């Protein structure tokens, strides 16, 4: 049975009639507790009514952290706060507070005052410095956060060890399902767990990360190792997705390690002992990124765009993003129209080198072009049949090098317009 999120009245007209994405997983995973972390959720009544909208995660002393944030020149106050807190705490964390419904962005000095107030209350609860508190917010931009409503409920929130599903639910905005992933893997003599939750549906083209994502493990890893692992695994995951080409002002991905697992000390990200852990972390990050695309606003199709034969991997990614972000490509796929000429357009407009005589376009295993024209024997009926499915594969070889990249996106339907036209209603 699919997970339905919107079950109670909320203020957003656009969200009242939201149905679970047809691309959603069948259910939220069973996520085991992780030693050293507890989770609490509550309803602050800011922007939403009848649903939880605040998450507070608390961590035992000794928990390490790494983070990456939006490169937007209009960052939210929580992003600014987190960057400074990471520097001041030297990679230590004791709590994370997330507010959904209000992004706390573009509110001048009120934004930072809200961060200071929330961090002050959270640090009193946990018994730590304010710099050990991480903050996130997501939702409407430009509205002052009624911070008193948030600080008032924090002391009464009850933390539990097995609250991952509730935590994933509390951070949603236009999402239609909560997003979570769990993996267990051997690290030295210990079996360690990696749990991750994320939110994201619209305003998605990460420029380091995507919207909000939090990954926690009980492995014992110093902050600099976490940082290296995070930056390595984020590029082919969160940085390889797009829904609508819009980079959020609030993008945040945090990776935390509670240090409760008993294994040999690891001081370098290149340690061979991390091989299986690194692979499992990559799977967690990629799975969460895919779920965000599958919950793209109004999405009905999950699209994989593979580009090979580019002058470099970076050039391949430019082409893949150009295809994945093209409204003409995305609407053609939404309408199940085999208009592959729009892919030609998207390749040509982005400025990356390509050889028209060698460029090969392929949909779902069906070769479309060769020698600078449509391929002999091309059967549009086969392409149309592929486009009727919900999993669309589009590959391009540019014929000029060995560069390659994969980007994931979704189609563009009228549902995207309906959601965003009424977002503040």
Image (cartoon, rainbow, N blue to C red):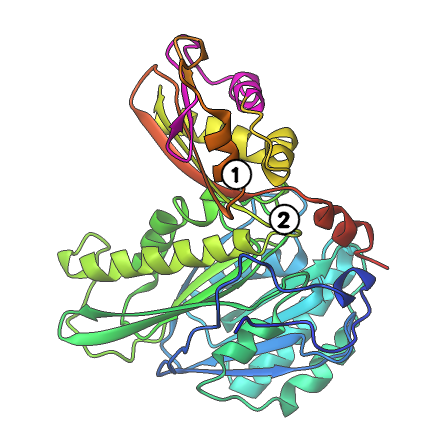
Using the image, tell me which numbered label, if any, was put on residue 213: none
The residue shown at (35%, 76%) is: 258
Residue 222 visible in the current orientation: yes
The residue shown at (40%, 77%) is: 31
Residue 103 visible in the current orientation: no
- Was residue 350 drawn as part of the magenta stretch in this picture? yes
The residue pinned by badge 1 equals 387
Which comes before the other along the chain, label 2 or label 1?
2
- Residues 344 and 108: in front is 344
The residue shown at (38%, 49%) is: 231
Note whether 304 is above or below 215 in the view shown.
Answer: above
Quadrant in the picture for residue 137: bottom right
State the CA–CA distance, disc 2 to disc 1: 30 Å
Q: Nearer the viewer, mark 2 or mark 1?
A: 1
User: Under tag 2, what secondary structure?
Assistant: loop
The segment highlighted magenta reads 341-368
Quarter in which the C terminus is drawn: bottom right
The residue pinned by badge 2 equals 248
User: Under tag 1, what secondary structure?
Assistant: helix
Q: Is residue 312 left or right of residue 207?
A: left
- Was residue 68 drawn as part of the magenta stretch in this picture? no
Please state the horizontal and vertical placement of residue 401, each as a whole percent of the image.
31, 18
Crowd tier of the residue under label 1, counting other residues whose Cα lies within 10 Å: few below 14, some 14–19, many 20 or above:
many
Quadrant in the picture for residue 14: bottom right
- Residues 348 and 424: in front is 348
């Amino acid at each position: 049975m699919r997970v339905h999120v919107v079950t109670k009245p909320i203020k957003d007209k656009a969200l009242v009639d939201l149905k679970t994405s047809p691309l959603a997983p069948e259910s939220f995973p069973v996520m085991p507790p992780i030693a050293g972390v507890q989770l609490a959720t509550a309803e602050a009544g800011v922007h939403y009514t009848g649903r939880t909208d605040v998450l507070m995660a608390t961590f035992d002393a000794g928990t390490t952290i790494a983070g990456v944030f939006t490169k937007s020149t209009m960052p939210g106050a929580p992003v600014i706060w987190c960057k400074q807190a990471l520097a001041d705490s030297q990679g230590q964390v004791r709590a994370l507070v997330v507010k959904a419904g209000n992004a706390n962005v573009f509110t001048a000095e009120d934004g930072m005052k809200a961060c200071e107030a929330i961090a002050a209350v959270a640090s009193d609860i946990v018994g730590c410095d304010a710099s050990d508190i991480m903050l996130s917010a997501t939702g409407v931009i430009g509205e002052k956060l009624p911070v008193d409503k948030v600080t008032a409920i924090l002391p009464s929130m009850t933390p539990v060890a097995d609250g991952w599903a509730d935590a994933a639910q509390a951070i949603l905005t236009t999402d239609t399902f909560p997003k979570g992933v769990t993996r267990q893997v051997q690290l030295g003599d210990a079996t360690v767990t990696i749990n991750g939750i994320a939110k994201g549906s619209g305003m998605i083209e990460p420029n380091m990360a995507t919207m909000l994502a939090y990954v926690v493990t009980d492995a014992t890893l110093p902050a600099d190792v976490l940082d290296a692992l995070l930056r390595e695994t984020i590029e082919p995951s969160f940085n390889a997705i797009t829904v609508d080409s819009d980079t959020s002002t609030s993008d945040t991905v945090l990776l935390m390690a509670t240090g409760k697992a008993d294994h040999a000390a690891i001081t370098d990200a290149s340690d061979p002992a991390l091989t299986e852990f690194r692979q499992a972390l990559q799977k967690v990050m990629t799975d969460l990124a895919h779920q965000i695309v599958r919950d793209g606003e109004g999405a009905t199709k999950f699209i994989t765009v593979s580009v090979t034969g580019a002058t470099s991997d970076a050039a391949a990614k430019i082409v893949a993003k150009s295809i994945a972000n093209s409204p003409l490509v995305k609407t053609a796929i939404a309408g199940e129209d085999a208009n592959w000429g729009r892919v030609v357009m998207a390749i040509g407009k982005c400025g990356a080198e390509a050889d028209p005589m060698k460029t090969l376009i392929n949909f779902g295993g069906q070769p479309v072009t060769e020698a600078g024209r449509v391929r002999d024997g091309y059967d549009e009926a086969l392409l149309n049949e592929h486009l009727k499915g919900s999993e669309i594969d589009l590959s391009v070889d540019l014929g000029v090098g060995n560069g390659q990249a994969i980007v994931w996106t979704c189609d563009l339907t009228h549902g995207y317009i309906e959601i965003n036209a009424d977002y503040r209603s």
